[in-house]
Amino acid sequence: MQLTSGPVDADLIFAIWQRFVATGALDLALDPIVAMSRQRCILRCNPYAAREMICICEAELADRRSRLSDLIALTRPFTKDLQTGLSQSLLYEGVASMAKYVAAVDQGTTSTRCMIFDHAGRVVAVDQKEHMQIYPKPGWVEHDALEIWARTQEVVEGALRKSGVDRSDIAAVGVTNQRETTVVWDKATGRPVYNAIVWQDTRTDQICNELAQDGGQDRFRAKVGLPLATYFSGPKIMWILENVPGVRERAEQGEVLFGNIDTWLIWNMTGGMNGGIHITDVSNASRTMLMNLETLDWDGDILRLMGIPRAMLPKIVPSSAVYGTAVGALHGVPVAGDLGDQQAALFGQTCYSVGEAKNTYGTGCFMLLNTGTKPVQSQNGLLTTVGYKIGDQPAVYCLEGSIAVTGALVQWLRDNLRFFDFSAHIEDYAKAVEDSGGIYIVPAFSGLFAPYWRSDARGVIVGLTRYITKNHICRAVLEATAYQTREVLDAMNKDSGVDLTALKVDGGMVFNNTLMQFQADILGVPVIRPTVSETTALGAAYAAGLAVGFWKEVDDLRANWGKDHEWLPQMDADKRERLYRGWKKAVTRTFDWVE
């Protein structure tokens, strides 16, 4: 091959890298390049080295061992270029420029899915599987973390199979997850020391009460933005350390690791016992009650008070950055995005400006409002949390209203009371009546979250008469979701000082037209569903794609957003307020149930 003078065509270099991907040599090409040049386009800084690389690749790509040696030798001249401060490697940019898709793993409370998206944010394929819900005692909720990892591998393989997409066409993969759910596992064996303790679990109530004896429920709120509640990970870690024999000692030695589900999955996806990466992003770390919102690092004072060894905690990283590469079905694909599920939905809804908000309807219901690059402390029962952090850019913060039980109430009718076989059937029963017949269902199965934060509350059905039928109960279940959302929206309006004029919605329940119309009626503002309603997975894909250059900036993502349907309020104001007063009265009946 004859070398010519002048700059080398970058597209040709990218094509060479794609040949490494196609021949399965990405694992060999990656380590030396990342180790020596995790910065942007270093080959462009040295055209002679670029031509040398082309020569190597065109030499029929000899055996893998010699290719690896050549790559290592090739990168040595570039070590001085690491001082340039450029931000990403040519490898990631090159692969991203050739790839057509981005993948996301969306690990939720009841199921795990893998979704593949194209550059326009359209769904190419999805595969989804449920996992077992474990209820050892009243108020206790657990998951089998090994089952979750197995389901994750299955849905990744399923999505690739359904789409016919080759892994070499995947630019990056992002992860989004049920937040707060706590896993502690053995670093050497990869086996959890105890089942995952789910965010809904209330066993840490006594731990929270003891911590609140000095300083009250808001003892740590100024630092972490959260009240003392069973919802968050810190008390769950304390429970495991105190109740699983031998774990505390091993944690202090760094022999066991903690993570929320994102950390557990990324550790396994990047090799597990064989070099898996132990990280979490700022959005998930902000849900542990252990991260300082100002420093974005673990707070040493809180760790000491809770008795949690820093050695077991993951490194806190941005939400959009290349963390490492996957093994298994996505072998060699950069793992480059990590967001808690509600923050991922905010990101997928393109709420990148101060004052933009979204509401996600899933197992629970979660409304987030973008408040910009400074944390805002709530005066009305909301949480202050990190929304996301893109690379080296400042973190973006949110106010959040968290509702524990919405879709889970529909599942309760389906699984516990056997009202119907499929959750979607609830709408058929609810539409059969004009209203709920005067009943209210307050689903305080795990106490009440925002804006009350009452762990002593338990669920009630009030207003029962002989007139009530199965249809009225189904309608009251849907209305409960809308009423709880109204409470959170009212609190958000008070904290922000600005009344929202419309609400972007996403999640599985937004296809229930009866619920969405009642939501618009009880809020008195339009409710808007986007073209892609599963914005949680889309947000994780966006974060991963941005990290590798598949999308260049957030404006590219805004261009992908589209409106699928809008519900306008139809209820008169007097009726709206009368129904809402009834709800507020029903909520008070849940208080002080647990002594």
Image (spheres, rainbow, N blue to C red):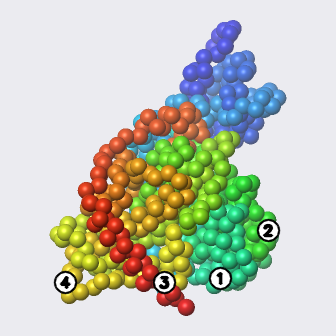
Whether residue 324 appears in this view of the structure is: no
> Label 3 to label 2, Cα distance in Å?
33 Å
Closer to the N terminus: mark 4 or mark 2?
A: 2
**Label 2 crowding class (10 Å Cα cut-off): few <14, some 14-19, many 20+?**
few
User: Which residue has dot 1 on it?
Assistant: 209
Give coordinates of residue 108: x percent, y percent.
47, 62
- Numbered disc in front, either 4 or 2: 4
Q: Secondary structure at mark 3?
A: loop
Q: Nearer the viewer, mark 1 or mark 3?
A: 3
- Mark 1 crowd level (few <14, some 14–19, many ≥20, 10 Å Cα): some
- Left or right, 365 with reference to 255: left
Q: Residue 132 in the image: x percent, y percent?
A: 44, 73
The image shows residue 250, relative to residue 391, as above or below, that is: below
> From where the camera sits, is residue 180 visible?
yes
Q: Quadrant of the C terminus?
A: bottom right
Image position of 587 with respect to 220: above or below: below
Camera-side residue of 218 and 206: 218
Provide residue 592's location: percent of width, then percent of height: 51, 87
**Quadrant in the picture for residue 215:** bottom right
The mark nearer the N terminus, 1 or 4, is 1
Which label belongs to residue 301? Answer: 2
Secondary structure state at the residue bearing disc 2: helix
Nearest to the observer: residue 301 or residue 577? 577
Can you identify the residue that label 4 sits on? 467
